[in-house]
Amino acid sequence: MSMTSDVAAQGRAARRRAPAGSPPPFPPAPWLRRYAAAVVVSDVVAVAVVVPTGIWLELGTNDLNFGDAVSPWLPLVSGLLTIVCLLLGRAWDPPVLGQGSEELSRLVRAVAASSVVLGMGGLALQIPSVRPWAFGLIPAMGVLSLVGRYALRRRLHAHRFEGRCVHPALAVGSVESISDLVDRTRRERSNGWVVHGACTPGGGADGVQDVLGVPVIGDLDAVAEVVRTGGYRVVAIGRAPGWTPRRLHQLAWDLEGLGADLVVDPGLMEVAGPRLHVAPVDGLPLLRLTQPSLTGLPRVVKAVIDRIGAAVVLALVTPLLLAIAVAVRADGGPVFFRQTRVGRHGRTFTMIKFRSMVPDAEARRRALVPANDGDGPLFKLRADPRVTRVGALLRRYSLDELPQLFNVLGGSMSLIGPRPPLPEEVATYDRTAKRKLRVRPGLTGLWQVSGRSDLSWEESVRLDLRYVENWSLALDALILWKTVGAVLRSDGAY
């Protein structure tokens, strides 16, 4: 018998071994059903708002070229086409709702598909009145849908911070991998996972009864039974000795039909997204890892966006910059603080900030080193006596960093990127940390939206490397969006 048929036979056997009295598949959580229904209603309402608007425009103006015999059908066709594309594009699948960029990606693809289909149909049938719908009104449906989904997601995240609307998760793996998962889920509560139980290789017999307060309730062989009896919605498999592809297959077969999501840590160093590709070899799926996008057209586009974005923001905040400059000057000393930092490929540059400390801050630093609250080579003080009264306010909302827009305009920095390090920090870098010098440092980055000064040195390096390894324009857009919230909440700012 071939290996493929042998594996399939084992899968059928594993399913037959399921206890006769095992619980039925877990029904979807009531809150998830309500949330999915609310998203569908929100999208349909967006369509229902735009369709009458289009009809009103058709009746009220001739400037949009609505005038042909087919136009009475266009509002209905456009609305129904958008809803069908949302359905076929799986934009309403419960697993992606409220889960970040994947939900946005599916919504955008569905709206774009409906515009293209309608536009191509109008072109083929020579119907000029299709243009306003394809290029204006259907995208407007997408914008309204996005606004509605954003409002629903904010409400969902508020519930999750209160401990509601969450998925109970079972963590499986070594104590170290489970600890890492528990830390991440507690830090990122908006994701909705709460680890309620753990299965380790020792299963508690080795003296480990809990991991960061999460009880150990079984070993690796007991996972399927624990899920059946415990009602877990997520089974997260981490690294552990003894895990083999065959055992993982058997677990997947045992969990079939229960309604629990099986997620597996691939064990790859923070690499995901566009760099991972499936490359099957004789039916064996292998993950192919491509080079990070550090050069080429995407980087040129990023550089153009950086400069245009910096120029636009500087033009908008000029009154604020002048007001801050007056306040800093009135506090005594120079307005700007200039410091040598290390940029791309190890080249140094002068970074500009609004001065937030006393003029002789650098001279007083040596005496404060024993009280350092920073981790690794970082020097940070939660209650730094050198910070001025105006500087404390500027630091709280990151206003002291606004002059770095001039660095972005000059090309030494980017809007998004790793934290710009000091030369003395770089002198202590190992090979891993030095890799983040392959891109321009940023005014904001993953470190900015993930806790800033509250991060450990290892966590800061890990986030910077994740950005370098997985960079994309979409990731930049997501970080910019999250930066606004992080600054307003003043997370980790001191």
Image (cartoon, helix red, strand yellow):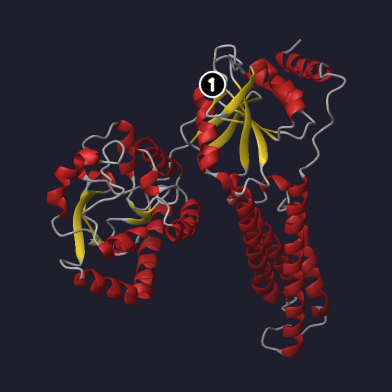
Q: Which residue is mark 1?
A: 174
- 68 sits to left or right of 104: right
Number of dots carrying numbers = 1
Q: Secondary structure at mark 1?
A: loop
Task: Tell me which residue sits at (72%, 52%) in the image.
Answer: 89
The structure residue drawn at horizontal position 33% and vertical position 74%, both measured from the top left corner, is 320
Query: At 65% across and 34% down in the image, what residue appears?
Result: 169
Q: Disc 1 residue type?
A: Ser
Residue at 72% from the left image edge and 84% from the top image edge = 57
Q: Nearer the viewer, residue 13 or 127?
A: 13
- Answer with the quarter of the image where residue 316 lies: bottom left
Q: Which image quarter: residue 24? A: top right
Q: In front: 66, or 339?
A: 339
Left or right of 108, for residue 328: left
Q: Is residue 214 visible?
A: yes
Instruction: Say left or right for 217 vs 253.
Output: left
Whether 370 is drawn above or below 314: the answer is above
* Residue 308: % across, % down: 38, 67
Q: Name the residue at the right extreme.
A: 20
**Vertical position of residue 287 compared to residue 318: above or below:** above
Which residue appears farthest toward the top when viewing the image? 1
Q: Is residue 410 visible?
A: no
Residue 300 or residue 14, whichever sits in front: 14
Looking at the figure, which quarter contains the N terminus?
top right
Residue 182 image position (x, y, % from top left): 54, 33
Residue 479 placement (x, y as % from top left): 47, 54
